[in-house]
């Protein structure tokens, strides 16, 4: 019972310190793939599978909501990285990614590390 209490305290301190925004290495919501439209859902699933195969927690928002709504929902869910995919990304097998906290973005080939 002593060990479990220590772990619970550590989790409580970490949660309080990070305001619920978990560091990437421990986050259950590391990456989300957001297609710009339903047309790119298939490519989104491909990207999701590649990232999952690399050992990361990854989701894809395949809903029919508009892009700004998908990105906002991902930010509220506190994903560490939001990858947006569309025509250019699918054509060049890339993803545009950004840190949810900084709103900065960059394009990267899929084989490049996050």
Image: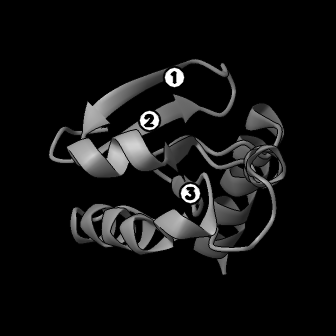
Name the image colouring: one colour
Q: Residue 105 carries which label?
A: 1
Q: Position of residue 100 (x, y in %)?
A: 66, 34
Counting every numbered tag in the picture gives 3
- Is 65 above or below relative to 80? below
Q: Do the residues labelled 1 and 2 touch (CB within 8 Å)?
A: yes
Q: How far apart are marks 2 and 3 (CA)?
A: 10 Å
Query: Between 24 and 50, which is closer to the camera in this rendering?
Result: 50
Secondary structure beneath dot 2 equals strand
What residue would you read off at disc 3? 35
> Relative to 32, is 16 on the left or the right?
right
The residue that appears at 66% across and 81% down in the rendered structure is 1
Precedes in sequence: disc 2 or disc 3: 3
Single out the residue that lies furthest toward the bottom: 1
- Is 10 above or below relative to 63? above
Q: How far apart are marks 1 and 3 (CA)?
A: 15 Å
Q: How crowded is mark 3: few (under 14 residues within 10 Å), some or many (20 or more)?
A: many
The quadrant holding residue 113 is: top left
What residue would you read off at disc 2? 96
> Relative to 9, is 76 on the left or the right?
right
């Amino acid at each position: 019972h002593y060990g479990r209490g220590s772990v619970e305290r550590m989790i409580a301190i970490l949660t309080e310190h990070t305001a619920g925004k978990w560091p990437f290495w421990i986050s259950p919501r590391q990456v989300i793939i957001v297609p710009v439209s339903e047309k790119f859902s298939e490519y989104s699933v491909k990207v999701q599978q590649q990232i999952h195969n690399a050992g990361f927690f990854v989701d894809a928002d395949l809903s029919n909501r508009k892009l700004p709504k998908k990105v906002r929902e991902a930010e509220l869910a506190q994903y560490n990285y939001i990858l947006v995919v569309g025509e250019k990304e699918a054509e060049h097998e890339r993803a545009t990614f950004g840190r949810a906290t900084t709103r900065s973005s960059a394009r990267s080939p899929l084989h490049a590390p996050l």
